[in-house]
Amino acid sequence: MASAVQPVVEDPGEDHVVSSLPRVECSRGTVSIVHSEIMRMDTVAVAREKEAGGMLMGGNQRKKTASQAKKSDKNQFSKKKAAGLCALRQLVKEHAPDVLCLAEPMVQVCKFPVIFFSRLGYAMDFIHNIRDEKVPNLWIIWKLGVSRPVVAGMSDQHISVIFDWPGSKVGISFVHASSFKIMRRQLWLDLELSISALVPWSVMGDFNATLLSHEKRGPGKFNLRSAAEFQAMVDACELLSIPSQGKKFTWTNNRRRGHVVAVLDRSFCNGKWIDVFRNVKQRVLLSSVSDHAPLIVVSDDVQRPTNIPFRFHSFWMENDQFISVVEEAWKTPIGGNPIFVLAQKLKQVKENLKVWARATFPNLNDEVDKAKLELKKVQDMIEVAGMTDELFNREADAKTVLLKANQMYEKLWDEKAKLRWMKNGDCNSKIFHLSVKLRRLKNQITSLKNEDGTCLSDQQGILSYVSDFFEKFHEADAITVHNDLLDNIPRVLEEEDVAGLEIVPSGDEIKQAVWDLDPVSSPGPDGFPGVAKAIVFDVTKYGAKANGKMDISKAVSSAWSASCASAVPSTVLMSKGTYLLGPVVLSGCCKSSSIGFQVEGIVQAPSSLAAFNEDWIVFKFSFSIVDRLNCSTMVNLPNNGL
C-alpha cells in the first residue's frame, strides 16, 4: 500500500496582507525599503515573542524557586542531622553510658548508622520497637562486652528489656509516651505487666506527663487527672523517683512568647535496684539540638563507710534494763569542768549502750526469721500430733515472740525513715524501707565541685577535699579589736532590759528547754536525739524524800504531770529507797504514746485507814492518746496495818 504525504498549506490570513507598496530610499549608495505595515507587523511579532518568552521564563523561575526551597530544606535537615550526631558523639565520649536509648531517631531501621556507633565502642546490633506503618521511635544500643538483652515487653510507647549484669539480672524499661492521655493509659497497663518486683528494675524516658503542679511553668493548666493516673502506675509498680541533679525542667517549647517548660523526662527504680546499686543518681544534661534534655542515670556500688557513728534508738527505752544501764554509766566518777564532765558522761553512756544494745537487740532480721521458724515448727507438731496443753503454750509463746520481733523491726525502720505523718499501728515496714533507701540516696555525696570548677567523684578525693576545706576554715585569723566602734552604736535598750538579757538561765529553764527538744529530730554530734534527753522524770527531782516518813503524793503527781505533758515516750522513776505514798490519782490527757512507771525502791502506804476512800494508786488517762502504760515495779508493802 502506498501512502502519500500531503503538504500543509498555511492560510496567510489578514495579518499577512499588505495594502500598499513600500517606500524606497537611497542614501550614499545604500537602498532602504521602508514599509510601515511590515514594520508594525514586526513590532507586534516581537511583542508576542517577548510575552511568550516571559511566560516560559516565569515557569522556569517557579520551578527553580521550588527546587531551591527543597534544596534548602534538605540542607537544613542535613545540618540538624549533623548537629544531632555531633551532640550524640560528644555525650557518648564524655559520659560513656553502658546502655544507650535514642527516642524519636526519625530514621528508617535500614539506615541505622552502624559505623557511627561501632566507632564509639557500641555493638553493631540494636533493638527497636515496632509501630504500625510508622518509623520506630525507640532504639536501644549497648556497649561491646555487654550481653544482648532479652525483650520482656514492647509497644509503640515503650521497650522493656532484661540484661545479664554481673551478680544478677536487671530490667530496664525505656519510655516514649504519647501526648494523648487516653493513649498513655495503655502504656501504664503495659508497664505494670512488664515490670517485676522480684528483679532490679529501672524505668526512664519521656512520659509526656507531670506528677506535681510545680513541674510545669507557663501557659496551660495542670492536668490533675493525668497526674493521678501517672502516680497510680508508679505506686502499682512500687517505683521510687531517682534523685535528680542538674536543671529542673527537661522539656521546653522553645518559644519566646508563650514559653512553656515542664518535667516530662524522668527516671524511676524499685527497691531491688537500690539493693544492687546502692548509689543511683539522675543527671539532666544540657539540651543543645533538641527540645528535650538528655538524661543519664548513673548506678554504681559505693562502699559503706566503716566508721558508722553511734545512733540512739528510742525503742531501747522500753526495755526494763535501760534505766539501770544509763545509771551505771552515769555513776562513773569524772572530774573537771562541769561541761567536760557532762560530755565525758555522755560518752560513757554511749559506750555502755553500744555493748548492751548489741547483746539485747541483735540483728532484728535474724530475730524475725528465727521467730517464724519456731512458730512454724510448733504448728507443724500440732498438725501431726494434735493440740496438747504443752503445744498450746508453746504456740502462744512463739506468737508472742514473733509479734515483739515484728514490732521492734517496724520501730527500727520507722525511726530510720523519719516519716512524721506515719504512725505505728499497721505494718508499714515496706514503706519505711523504701523511704529509708530514698533518703540515703539523697544524702549520699557522690561528687563535689571545687573552687576551680572541676568535679571530684572518687571517695578518697572527696574525703581529702572536705577535710582540707574545714581545716582551713577553722584556722585562727589575726583579729584587730576596735572597741571605739562600740561607742558609735546607739543605746536603744534600757539598763533593765540589758540586765534581763544577761541573766544566766536557771536549771529549770535549761531542763525545760531540753525537754522541749524535738523527739524525732536528727541526732547531735553525740548521737543522741531529743527523745534521749527527756525520758526520765525522777520523783526526787520534784521534792520527794526517800526516808519513809514524808508523803510523796504531790511529788508523784508532779512527776506524772510532767511525763504526761511530754510528747515523747517517758518514764516516771522512783529510785532506790523507802517512800511513803498516800492515796494518789494520776490522771490527764497525755501527749506521749507510751508512759512508763518504774519503782525500784520500797513504797509504803499510810498506816491509818482513814486516809483511804477507796483505792490507793489510780491511773486515769485517755487511751485514745496514750497507747501503752508500762509498769515495772519492785514494791514491798510491809505489814503496817493496811
Image: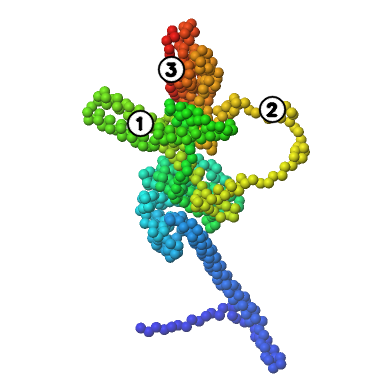
Residue at 62 percent across and 46 percent down: it is 475
Q: Which mark is residue 402?
A: 1
Q: Which mark is residue 635?
A: 3
Residue type, mark 2 in image? Gly
Q: Crowding near pointer 3: few (<14 within 10 Å), some, many (20+)?
A: some
The x, y position of residue 511, in whole percent, is: 57, 27
Query: In which quadrant will I find the N terminus?
Result: bottom left
Q: From the image, tell me which residue sits under label 2.
A: 500
Alpha carbon distance from label 2 to label 1: 57 Å
Could you say which is closer to the camera, residue 82 or residue 96?
Answer: 96
Residue 637 seen in this snapshot: yes
The x, y position of residue 271, in whole percent, is: 42, 43
Image position of 408 (left or right of 72)? left
Q: Residue furthest bottom?
A: 29
Rendered image quadrant of residue 41: bottom right
Q: Residue furthest left?
A: 385
Q: Earlier in the sequence, mark 2 or mark 1?
A: 1
Q: Earlier in the sequence, mark 2 or mark 3?
A: 2
Which element carries disc 2, helix, strand or loop?
helix
Residue at 71 percent across and 44 percent down: it is 480
